[in-house]
């Protein structure tokens, strides 16, 4: 499913394709989506005035609250008789957001996910274990349809039943795993408890997404599972998985620019930043039929990776997500993302890559403490060794983040494992304690 006629087209042709598709999308949403018609009119924006991609910066942004206010079907650009599938976000940060798909959307999504899996080296000869959740979450069915489009053997096991997952991996000869990185880590640890060395199995690759993860986490997964770990990216409001993916070079995620326009903007000024600078990721869909989104503010922090890729693809690359603006912690004036803490912890011998950032109140002040599991071989009852490790972890975090954060070492397996997205931040400030 590598499509060089699309993925390696020259930039001038790609710009023309994006501009044409953008103009058509803007016309459609103005005519069919009341929210966009109101936004455009209030901003004095004429959808017919767009002549090039540079004009996109004059279009109003879309935010998650727009989708929430239109719940459930107010953002749809087609009648419900044309909608063949509905998915929704988890709603963990508020009311769920609903997205729909036409038959054409499902076809394009399947193609994009087949393209994503192919970028990880998958072929029709692979046996793919889909351990993302099925249901309203887009991950499971998104990867599933892509795997079938690729012609691979697809195992729709979903999340959970971790020991059974290992048994299936062994017995069915699985060659590629699709899961969140935190769940993939749990699978590897559970396999060791069962006396199974995954490195001895046919498994050779994994496609991991749905949560930010660090480069050090990649190294740990590759060593634990004996695989090549590939980062993939998507979000339900834009499509689901299939928006961007790493290739074998693992130096940025290629955005599928024949279907999406990416911008990086300053989250404060909302002005575009130059390539190479960090900012908030903004996406515009240019082929979706059921629910197109225009300049959707994802809240994800990344940057455009400058230069060209050795794989031959000409689509621009975005760096792996470093965090989300709504997950950012401000500790004594310093901006801190949980993924930065993870990057530090996964490089320290003696601690496990399982942690939580716990927010509490001390008087009127916010207090931040990182709970970190020690490694399974660490003698937790040796007080002096524990104190030395605690000081070391605190020092490494302070050195990397230029801020001192309290650290509490906890026993192995004491931090709750997730079979989906890991919960990295626990906010107890309204409860008055830890």
Image (cartoon, helix red, strand yellow):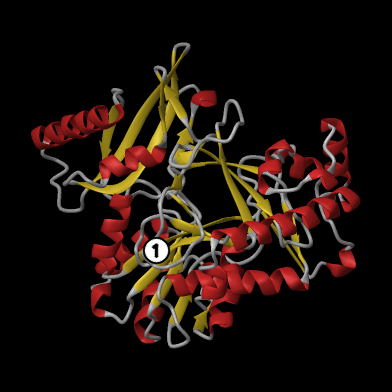
Classify 87 as above or below 57. Answer: below
Q: Residue at x 55, y 67 (%)?
A: 9
Residue at the top extreme? 364
In this rendering, position of residue 84 left or right of residue 202? right
In terms of secondary structure, where does tag 1 sit? strand
Q: Is residue 137 visible?
A: no
Say which of 50 and 132 sits in front: 50
Residue 170 % position (x, y): 34, 82
Classify 85 as above or below 398. Answer: below
**If the image is split into quadrants, where does the C terminus sit?**
top left
Q: Is residue 318 visible?
A: yes
Label 1, residues with CA under 10 Å away: few <14, some 14-19, many ≥20: many
Residue 428 % position (x, y): 49, 29
Q: Residue at x 90, y 51 (%)?
A: 31
Q: Quadrant of residue 14?
A: bottom right
In this rendering, position of residue 6 left or right of residue 102? left
Residue at the bottom extreme? 125
Say which of 27 and 215 sits in front: 27
Residue 160 % position (x, y): 48, 65
Disc 1 target residue = 230
């Amino acid at each position: 499913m590598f499509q060089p006629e699309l993925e390696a087209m020259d930039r001038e042709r790609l710009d023309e394709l994006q501009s044409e598709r953008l103009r058509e999308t803007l016309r459609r949403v103005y005519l069919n989506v009341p929210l966009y018609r109101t936004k455009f009119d209030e901003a004095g924006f004429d959808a017919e005035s767009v002549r090039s991609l540079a004009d996109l910066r004059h279009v109003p942004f879309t935010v998650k609250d727009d989708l929430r206010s239109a719940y459930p079907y107010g953002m749809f650009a087609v009648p419900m008789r044309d909608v063949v599938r509905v998915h929704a976000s988890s709603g963990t940060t508020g009311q769920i957001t609903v997205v729909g798909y036409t038959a054409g959307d499902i076809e394009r999504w399947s193609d994009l996910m087949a393209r994503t899996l192919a970028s990880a080296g998958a072929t029709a000869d692979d046996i793919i274990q889909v351990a993302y959740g099925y249901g309203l979450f887009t991950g499971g069915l998104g990867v599933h349809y892509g795997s079938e489009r690729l012609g691979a053997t697809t195992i729709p096991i979903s999340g959970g039943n971790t020991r059974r997952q290992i048994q299936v991996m062994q017995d069915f000869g699985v060659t590629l795993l699709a899961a969140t990185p935190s769940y993939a880590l749990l699978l590897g640890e559970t396999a060791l408890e069962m006396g199974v060395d995954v490195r001895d199995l046919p498994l050779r690759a994994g496609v991991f997404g749905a949560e930010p993860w660090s480069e050090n986490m990649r190294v740990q997964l590759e060593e634990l599972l004996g695989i090549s770990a590939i980062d993939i990216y998507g979000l339900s409001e834009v499509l689901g998985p299939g928006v961007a993916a790493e290739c074998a070079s693992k130096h940025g995620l290629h955005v599928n620019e024949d279907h999406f326009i990416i911008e990086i903007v300053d989250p404060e000024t909302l002005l575009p930043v130059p390539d190479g600078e960090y900012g908030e990721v903004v996406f515009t869909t240019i082929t979706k039929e059921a629910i197109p989104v225009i300049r959707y503010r994802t809240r994800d922090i990344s940057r455009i990776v400058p230069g060209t890729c050795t794989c031959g693809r000409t689509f621009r690359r975005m760096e792996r997500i470093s965090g989300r603006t709504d997950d950012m912690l401000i500790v004594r004036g310093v901006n801190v993302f949980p993924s930065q803490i993870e990057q530090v912890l996964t490089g320290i011998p003696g601690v496990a890559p399982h942690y939580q950032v716990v927010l509490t109140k001390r008087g009127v002040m916010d207090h931040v403490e990182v709970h970190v599991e020690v490694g399974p071989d660490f003698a937790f009852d040796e007080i002096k060794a524990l104190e030395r490790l605690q000081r070391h972890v605190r020092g490494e975090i302070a050195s990397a983040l230029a801020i001192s954060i309290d650290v509490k070492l906890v026993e192995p397996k004491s931090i709750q494992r997730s079979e989906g997205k890991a919960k990295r931040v626990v906010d107890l400030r309204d409860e008055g304690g830890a």
